[in-house]
Image: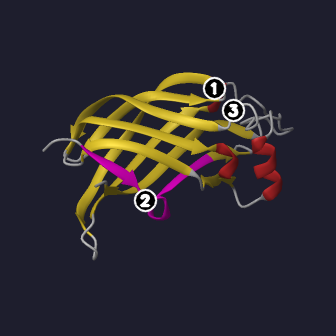
Amino acid sequence: MANSKWAVDATHSSIDFSVRHMMIANVKGTFHQFEAAVEADPQDLTTADIRFTVDLSSVDTRNADRDNHLKTADFFDVEQFPQLVFQSTSIAKKDEGEYAVTGDLTLHGVTKSETFTVTFKGQGKDPWGNEKAGFSAEGIINRSDYGLTWNSALETGGVLVGDKVKISLQIEAAKAE
């Protein structure tokens, strides 16, 4: 089957993250505004072209003060760097329906190669006859690799904010006409 264009259905998709806080807990958040350009055969992603763009000002950790801090120059600096962008560069099949998707991730003015595990969740028609496909993606990035180094030492040892950020995507896409 040839690659087709797919439109990500943002109302049925999510981009979430979690990071260690005070060395003892995880803080979770989400981004509400994102878009994607995907050309793929859902049954075989090895030839896919995937590009995600995330509006960093849409960050939501369920705490307005923390969200506002994340938008400042201490972290995302959304005035200077408003988006996170991921562009796939290579895709390798790992197992049935599971792929290692490697690409250029640009955040805070820095571009690095990152790999995410992407799983094809299934495909079918909705009640209106539209072809849909579902995917999940998981990965971990080090925020310090992107110049996101703000932190505060704890008197008990360790730091306030962990370096590793777990990223999780749940994607529902519709085949474009």
Residue 67 in view in this figure: yes
Q: Amino acid at mark 2?
A: Asp
Q: Is residue 107 above or below residue 98?
A: above
**Camera-nearest label, 1 or 3:** 3
Element under disc 1: helix
**Camera-nearest label, 2 or 1:** 2
How does the figure colour the protein chain or chains? Answer: secondary structure
Q: Determine which residue is flagged by label 2.
A: 9
Question: Which is more toward the observer, 20 or 42?
Answer: 42
Report if residue 68 lies within the magenta region. Answer: no
- Point out the stretch of residues depicted in magenta: 4-18
The structure residue drawn at horizontal position 76% and vertical position 36%, both measured from the top left corner, is 79
Question: Which is more toward the observer, 41 or 145?
Answer: 41
Q: Determine which residue is flagged by label 3.
A: 81
| Residues packed near mark 2 inside 10 Å, few (<14), some (14 to 19) or many (20 plus) | some
Of the residues under marks 3 and 2, which one precedes in the sequence?
2
Q: Determine which residue is flagged by label 1.
A: 146
Distance of mark 2 from mark 1, alpha carbons?
28 Å
The structure residue drawn at horizontal position 43% and vertical position 37%, both measured from the top left corner, is 51
Q: Is residue 50 above or below residue 13?
A: above
Which residue is farthest right? 155
Mark on residue 23?
none
Residue 136, given in percent of the width and then of the height, sits at 38, 52
Query: Magenta-highlighted stretch: main secondary structure?
Result: strand
